[in-house]
Amino acid sequence: MTRLSAVLRGPATALAALLVVTAAPADAHAQSGPRAPKDFVALGSVDPTIVQEMRYVTPHNFVGARVDGYRQPLCILTRPAAEALHRAQTHLLRQGYSLKVYDCYRPQRAVDHFVRWAEDLDDQGMKAEFYPDVDKSRLFADGYIAERSGHSRGSTVDLTIVELPARPTRPYHPGQPLVPCYAPRDERFPDNSVDMGTGYDCFDTRSHTLDPRVQGAQRANRLLLKNTLEHVGLVNLPEEWWHFTYKPEPHPDTYFDFPVSAGSLTGRP
């Protein structure tokens, strides 16, 4: 997800022999092609110490399946955003913590997959974990799903903090019993993150960064993430404690659709 409220809405256009992208509104444009622009990098090439748990390559997400466009578990970002994360990581490592990213650049075809899923009201397979108190018919109206995402511009990242040494996260097995994403930490799906009060991609107002119901250590952990990232130029989306965008964005009006893969950076399929 992200609470895709930092988005614009627009119709879809197909380009023959090229990748499919969504047509942009008047103040934006979309770019297709198999290769990322030269200022996009793999986060691991800038800082290999940042933990990566790329959720949309796996079935453990609100869709319940690998999301279109995610070919490899790879975090891709614009270089300025990646370098900002490196600066934040340097600060956290001194305190015994590490960043962990869940999602970085997101191709437009992945956003289109989210839209198709949201329109299929019969698909409620992951409701019990990711949106237990939200009627699926309201996902668009409530701002959780939209036809554009800032992630597609390449400078937005979903992430958390883990305490070092990082424990492995137990694998998710499709069909296993699901627990609400806002349940107490020892009841919801285990994550090696520090306790943020909800799991990642929790469609609930408890995910608002400064929700007054989240106090104590959970609030302190959210503020540690927020303050650390804001210090290096990343701005939080208030509705999602995990969602940050580097400012100023190198591509503020472009929504890319190259796949998430090493080949998109090298030009090789």
Image (tube, rainbow, N blue to C red):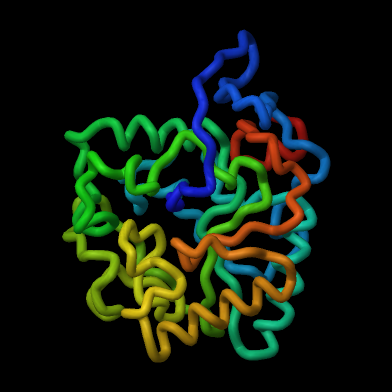
Q: Which quadrant is the C terminus positioned in?
A: top right
Q: Position of residue 62 (x, y in %)?
A: 33, 49
Quadrant in the rendering for residue 203: bottom left
Q: Position of residue 222 (x, y in %)?
A: 49, 78
> How many discs mark residues in the rendered view?
0
State the residue in front, 113 or 244.
244
Q: Position of residue 122 (x, y in %)?
A: 17, 34
Residue at left offset 23%, top offset 76%: 187
Q: In this view, does 177 lie above or below 261?
A: below
State the residue in front, 56 or 127.
127
Q: Position of residue 228 (x, y in %)?
A: 65, 78
State the residue in front, 120 or 38.
120
Q: Which residue lies furthest to the front in this view?
A: 26
Q: In this view, does 160 lie above or below 62?
A: below
Residue at left offset 56%, top offset 43%: 106
In the figure, is residue 74 to the left or right of 111? right
In the figure, is residue 58 to the left or right of 230? left
Q: In this view, does 128 lie above or below 111?
A: below
Residue at left offset 57%, top offset 82%: 224
Residue at left offset 74%, top offset 71%: 232
In the figure, is residue 125 to the left or right of 241? left
